Image: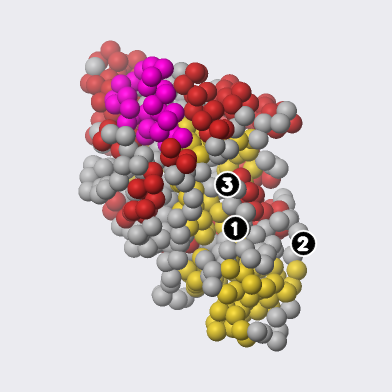
Amino acid sequence: MTFDILIKKGTVIDGLANEPFAADVGIVGNRIKAVGNLQQARGRQEISAADCFVTPGFIDIQNHSDSYLTLLDHPGMDGLVSQGITTVLVGHCGTSLAPLPSAEAFKSIQKWRSLVGANINWQTFDEYLAALSGYPLGANVAGLVGHATVRRGILGDQLRAATPEESRIVDDVLRRSMDAGAFGVSLGLVYAHEVNSSEQELLAVAKATASREKLLSVHLRSEGSHVVPALSEVIDLAEKAGTALKISHFKIRGQSNYHYLDEALSTIDRAYQRGVEVFFDIYPYTTSWTVLYTYLPKWAYEGGKKSILQNLKDRTARERILVHLRGLEANLGAVFVASAESNPGLAGKTLAQIAVNQEVSVEEALLRVLGGTAAQAIVFDRNLSEDIMLSLLAHPLSVVASDGAGYGFAYSATQGLVHPRCFGAMPRFLSLVREKKFMSWSEAIKKITSRPADKMKLSNRGRIAVGAAADLVIFDPETIGSRATYENPYQEADGVSYVLVNGQVAFAARAESRATAGKILK
């Protein structure tokens, strides 16, 4: 028998937590045609996987390639594909590129990326998917609907609870978007345009998601001292509505809050035992990549960017903000600016360095950065515990995701730094599995393949089986790892030999010619 691609002499880890086994994999078109002893077969292209694992393509269930606009700027997503990611789910934390009920809706992404030069030629979710299908996508793309995007498109820049009529319109737009192919809805409850959403409004969103048997993905109101009430809030929503719930980039921020871990996990575990379909994703790093304005008290940013800048200019409001910042137990001085498009000279500097240079306090330096960037700054904060990270990675309800975006390797560092997870999240996770030995290889692969696939109801991806989509990764378990750093993230991972997307070679080590074979998934 002749295959289009024949992968020979590999150790297959099928993504379903079965024990690794020696096998060849034959591919015809975009499907896996055979798995087993294929020594007598031939391939138009033959790939040796000796001493390597052959696994399903990694599924990144928490990805921000849309909100950073890299999905449009760098649709090849080289930094993601080269680390083995073959499918991404975008539209998280309340924000998506569609639907856009009004021009105001598109502004929901400006906390992450300047809108200057953005070219949008769609309004509805199905128009968005149709437009994306014309891009040379490196990986498969699936999308959620961002609640803040829709809400802002209906309410404009008003920061208040929606009226019953407005909530009904939002609900209708969400349902139509899910019918057009969205995999669910996301909430970003910490951000300005959702922080005032009422319980009734959020419950309506959760019920809309449940009515289509889709996924509700939530960025909690707090990942620090109020993490347990924040968890209880969204679990209660999911339980009342009967919807599946994903907690985005779950973490405990700040050393003074680490002791909340047991109570937080107990809250999740008890909900799961009651029948709530809850799980969480986590990235394998101890440094967060976050929007600087979220360090302010909520009242200071509830009005969005305009309100933030007004509060910074008002002497009384500014002093109240400084009092709040001085009361934080976080090490603000160690926070360093990753990107600030309107003031790129700040990138790479810590707030402590800026404070010394300007002869002000660290708290005042933070406010000056916000004022000098029009409240549009992204920062790195080493505020997470490695022990907690490892325990969350090993938790039976966790999946591993990048929470990053797809960049090209030629992306200009003058535009700012990006988190190394954009280039190395999956290899770093797998290197931790090898070094720390806190779970088996089979369970680790399941956390980045069939488990997220099943949560998205992708029955033909995330597994190696006859008839499944030919999304595959070949990597060396002895050398797999990430070389991406905070100072220089634009580096290929170690140990990844080949990545196949829909039966085509999307990445091969030391090869410059790579297919862009990603599809839009609905």
Please identify the quadrant where the N terminus is shown: bottom right
Whole-percent x and y of residue 143? 46, 46
Q: In the depicted view, which residue is nearer to us: 82 or 204?
A: 204
Q: Do labels 3 and 1 touch, CB within 8 Å?
A: no
Label 2 element class? loop
Residue stretch in magenta: 146-175
Is any atom of residue 30 visible in this view?
yes
Q: Toward the viewer: 423 or 136? A: 136
* 58 to the left or right of 70: right
**Could you tell me residue 163's position as x and y percent?**
38, 16
Q: Amino acid at mark 3?
A: Met
Of badges 1 and 2, the one in the foreground is 1
Residue 64, placed above or below residue 377: below
Task: Answer with mark 1 or mark 2, whichever residue precedes in sequence.
Answer: 2
Residue 456, which numbered label? 3
Helix, strand or loop for the magenta stretch, by majority: helix
Residue at (63%, 48%) from the top-left corner? Answer: 454
Kindly identify the amino acid type of the residue bearing the numbered disc 1: Arg
User: What is the secondary structure assignment of the residue under circle 1?
Assistant: loop
Which residue in the protein does label 1 denote? 461
Q: Residue furthest top?
A: 316
Q: Is residue 470 above or below residue 264?
A: below
* Magenta residue check for 142: no
**Which residue bears the numbered disc 2?**
19
Q: How many marks?
A: 3
Q: Say whether marks 1 and 2 touch (CB < 8 Å).
A: no
Whether 161 is among the magenta residues is: yes
Among numbered discs 3 and 1, the one appearing first in the sequence: 3
Q: Residue at x 45, y 55 (%)?
A: 520
